[in-house]
Image (cartoon, grey):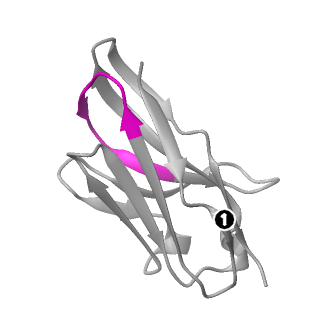
Amino acid sequence: QVRLVESGGGLVQPGGSLRLSCAASGNILSIGNMGWYRQAPGHQRELVAVITADGKTNYGDSVKGRFTISRDNAKKTVHLQMNSLKPEDTAVYYCNLPRVRSASGWGDYWGQGTQVTVSS
């Protein structure tokens, strides 16, 4: 059974920073892309950032230049460094591992979500 555990959300003032982490556990053989999505109330879930297995990154237009995604393959962890946060970044953030090979086969996994609130 593959499990994703997120951490690092919270309340921050505009202009501040937060770092989200998502750790995967279980009988994992390989992980492809790792990504972060977010969903604000009344809005659809949107892509924040994704990183490939070999480290290539892609970002949503609204976070380019402010957020940085990284991964630690040995620890099966993906991070999202968020700088210059704005009130419009307020959302529940979800990590996603869409292609994980485990002892059970291939799977698409989501974290439980972590709340990020940007407010003064």
**Residue 72 drawn in magenta:** no
In which quadrant of the rendered image does the C terminus lie? bottom right
**Magenta stretch holds residue 35:** yes
Nearer to the camera, 115 or 7: 7
Q: Secondary structure at mark 1?
A: strand
Residue furthest to the bottom: 15
Tell me residue 67's x, y (percent).
45, 73
In the rendered structure, which segment of residues is drawn in magenta? 24-36
Instruction: Tell me the residue at 35%/25% (across/down).
Output: 26
**Residue 3's x, y, as percent?**
46, 30
Residue at screen point 70% across, 83% down: 13
Please determine whether, in this image, residue 111 is positioned above or below residue 63.
above
Place of residue 4 in the rendered image (x, y in percent of width and height, measured from the top left): 47, 36
2 vs 61, left or right, is left
- The amino acid marked with disc number 1 is Gly
Camera-side residue: 47 or 110? 110
Residue in the image at 42% along x and 18% along y: 1
Specify the quadrant of the image occupied by residue 70.
bottom left
Q: Position of residue 21 (x, y in %)?
A: 45, 55
Near mark 1 (Cα within 10 A), the count class, few <14, some 14-19 or many ≥20, is some
Q: Quadrant of residue 23?
A: top left
The part of the image, by quadrant, that contains residue 71 is: bottom left
In this picture, residue 9 sits left or right of residue 52: right
When the figure is inspected, residue 68 is found, relative to residue 6, above or below; the finding is: below
